[in-house]
């Protein structure tokens, strides 16, 4: 596995690989790699000839007072995990090798970028879109693997790639969970013991919402919303930010659904803020 902190070196390696006829898979991460990241890398390795992984805690997507300084950084471990999962190239830039000066030109995400996560984290998706545009421009033509764990990010990245004609095919990756249902996340390490014990409540609320949505006549979204809220009321560690039933492409709230919908949830405790989601199909009752 080749490792660099210089974006132009990764670009040269990938250009050479493409010239030799290889297909490139790319998985961007902020490091602190867990089983979700390694599953995505392994899938990319199974589907592409070479796999590039980026490890960069992107300052642009953290708001003031968020956990940028505290975000776990463990490059040695990450490199070992990336290699074991099948990565061929890793870009682990310093903030200075990524941005020689503070960026003058950034990408702004309207409407959808300001809803849900965007409402609780103003500017977050502009920071994500700016770094993803930069990374995809460094990497060049590729299959870009993004997790459904960050569902709104996935929807926005798909629009970003379409709207700016970036040379990537976005590949969505299923959420990897702990045995008790908690979605793997680098931020789970912030959780105190009693918070960790309560944390699967987000997934259980999603499952309660799914059951109620699929049982209700005409797939009524309101029933699912109350089921999710009721489930969250059964514990007092996490405070709900939102729980909703939305269109899987626009993330607009739904009243009734005839096909696929997405249940989304976000909640916070003293040490962390967690998000999760699942897909539901109104036809599968
Ligand atoms: P992050 O390092 O948190 O920025 O995540 C990098 C990529 O890994 C994103 O596309 C995430 O959606 C994805 N990811 C994070 N957690 C999981 C998970 N539990 N299962 C699958 N993919 C994940």
Image (cartoon, grey):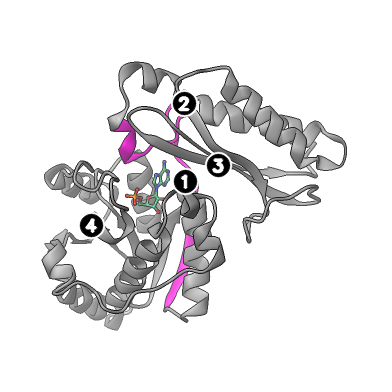
Residue at left offset 38%, top offset 43%: 36
**Number of other residues with Cα within 10 Å of mark 2, as a class: few under 14, some 14 to 19, many 20 or more:** many
> What residue sits right under mark 4 in the picture?
56
Q: Which residues are magenta?
A: 167-189
Q: Earlier in the sequence, mark 3 or mark 1?
A: 1
Q: Is mark 2 within 8 Å of ligand 1?
A: no
Quadrant of residue 229 in the image? top right
Q: Earlier in the sequence, mark 3 or mark 4?
A: 4
Q: Nearer the viewer, mark 3 or mark 2?
A: 2
Residue at left offset 40%, top offset 28%: 269
Residue at left offset 52%, top offset 30%: 202
Point out residue 111 in the picture as x, y percentages from the top left corner: 56, 65
Q: Earlier in the sequence, mark 1 or mark 4?
A: 4
Q: Is residue 173 left or right of residue 221?
A: left
Nearest the eye: 236 or 89: 236
Q: Is mark 1 within 8 Å of ligand 1?
A: yes
Nearest the eye: 267 or 145: 267
Q: Nearer the viewer, mark 1 or mark 2?
A: 2
Point out residue 249 in the picture as x, y percentages from the top left corner: 63, 60
> What residue sits right under mark 3 in the picture?
277
Quadrant of residue 72 in the image? top left
Q: Is 261 contained in the magenta span?
A: no
Disc 4/disc 2 C-alpha distance (Å): 29 Å
Contact between marks 3 and 1 (CB within 8 A): the answer is yes
Classify the position of the C terminus by image quarter.
top right
**Number of other residues with Cα within 10 Å of mark 3, as a class: few under 14, some 14 to 19, many 20 or more:** many
């Amino acid at each position: 596995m080749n490792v660099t902190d210089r974006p132009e070196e990764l670009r040269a390696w990938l250009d050479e690989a493409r010239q030799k006829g290889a297909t490139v898979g790319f998985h961007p991460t902020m490091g602190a790699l867990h089983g979700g990241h390694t599953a995505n890398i392994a899938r990319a390795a199974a589907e592409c000839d070479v796999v590039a992984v980026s490890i960069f805690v992107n300052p642009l997507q953290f708001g003031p007072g968020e956990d940028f300084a505290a975000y776990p950084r463990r490059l040695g471990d990450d490199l070992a995990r990336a290699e074991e999962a099948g990565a061929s190239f890793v870009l682990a830039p310093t903030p200075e090798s990524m941005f020689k000066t503070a960026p003058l030109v950034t990408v702004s995400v309207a409407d959808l970028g300001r809803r849900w996560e965007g409402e609780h984290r103003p500017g977050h998706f502009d920071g994500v879109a700016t770094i993803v545009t930069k990374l995809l421009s460094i990497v060049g033509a590729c299959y870009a693997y993004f997790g459904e764990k960050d569902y709104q990010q996935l929807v926005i990245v798909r629009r970003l790639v379409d709207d700016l004609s970036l040379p990537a095919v976005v590949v969505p990756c299923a959420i990897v969970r702990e045995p008790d249902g908690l979605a793997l996340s680098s931020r789970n390490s912030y959780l105190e013991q009693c918070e960790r014990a309560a944390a699967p409540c987000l997934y259980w609320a999603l499952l309660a919402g799914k059951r109620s949505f699929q049982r209700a006549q005409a797939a009524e979204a309101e029933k699912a919303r109350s089921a999710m809220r009721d489930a969250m009321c059964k514990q007092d560690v996490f405070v709900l930010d939102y729980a909703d039933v939305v269109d899987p492409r626009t993330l607009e709230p739904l009243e009734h659904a005839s096909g696929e919908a997405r249940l989304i949830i976000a909640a916070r405790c003293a040490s962390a803020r967690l998000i999760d989601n699942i897909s539901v199909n109104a036809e599968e009752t």
